[in-house]
Image: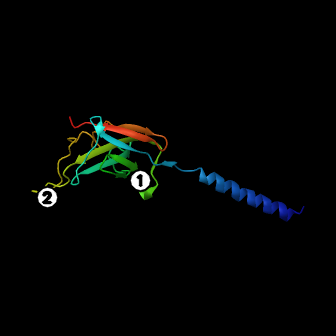
Amino acid sequence: MSATFWRGCAGFFLVAALTLGATGCGPSYVKPKGKITLDGQPLKISEKGILQVTFYKEDDKEGKNPFATTVDRDGSFEVTGEKSKGLPKGKYRIAVEIHDPYKDEKTGRMGPDLLKGKYTKEKTPLVKDISGNDELTLDVSAK
């Protein structure tokens, strides 16, 4: 076999190795989902209410890089993250707020958080290690 053939094969295998190696680089993204319960019971929010669930990397103390979720009135959620990629595996603080009603009709301002601010990004005790497409049940308390 000619030297040109072997050079072509070597080039092919080099490109293949670099391509396969590059796919393993960077964080692995997952899309955990779950349900918020209130004092151990299924969550019920009125048509005028809103549930907010936000994930923050545990070391993001200032909460500058939130990972968004999609939520339903029954408390179910899925982490969509930036560009719908989910979030990288790791440890997360989870902030939860329930505003029902969402807006105070008299003042036009956001209604009070039914959880009394106990689960904001600064105060939340909810910390989870996310290692895959986990199914989470997060119980919060209004007491």
Quarter holding residue 128: top left
Residue at point 36%, 41% (across, down): 93
Q: Residue furthest left?
A: 106
| Amino acid beneath label 1 | Gly
User: Of marks 1 and 2, which one's residue comes earlier in the chain?
Assistant: 1
Residue at point 59%, 50% (across, down): 24
Q: Residue furthest bottom?
A: 4
Tell me the quadrant of the picture where the C terminus can be found. top left
Above-or-below relation of 90 to 4: above
Residue at point 20%, 49% (across, down): 100
The image position of residue 97, as x and y in percent, is: 26, 46
3D distance between C-alphas at marks 1 and 2: 29 Å
Q: Residue 81, which numbered label?
A: 1
Q: Which residue is mark 2?
A: 108
| Amino acid beneath label 2 | Gly
Above-or-below relation of 102 to 133: below
- Can residue 78 be seen in the rendering of this structure? yes
Mark 1 Cα-neighbour bin, 10 Å: few <14, some 14–19, many ≥20: many
- Can residue 124 be seen in the rendering of this structure? no
Q: Secondary structure at mark 1?
A: loop
**Left-right relation of 83 to 121:** right
**Left-right relation of 143 to 12:** left
Q: Secondary structure at mark 2?
A: loop
Compare residues 73 and 24 and report the one nearer the observer. 73
Compare residues 17 and 50 and report the one nearer the observer. 50
The image position of residue 121, as x and y in percent, is: 30, 44
**Left-right relation of 8 to 97:** right
Quarter holding residue 6: bottom right
Mark 2 Cα-neighbour bin, 10 Å: few <14, some 14–19, many ≥20: few
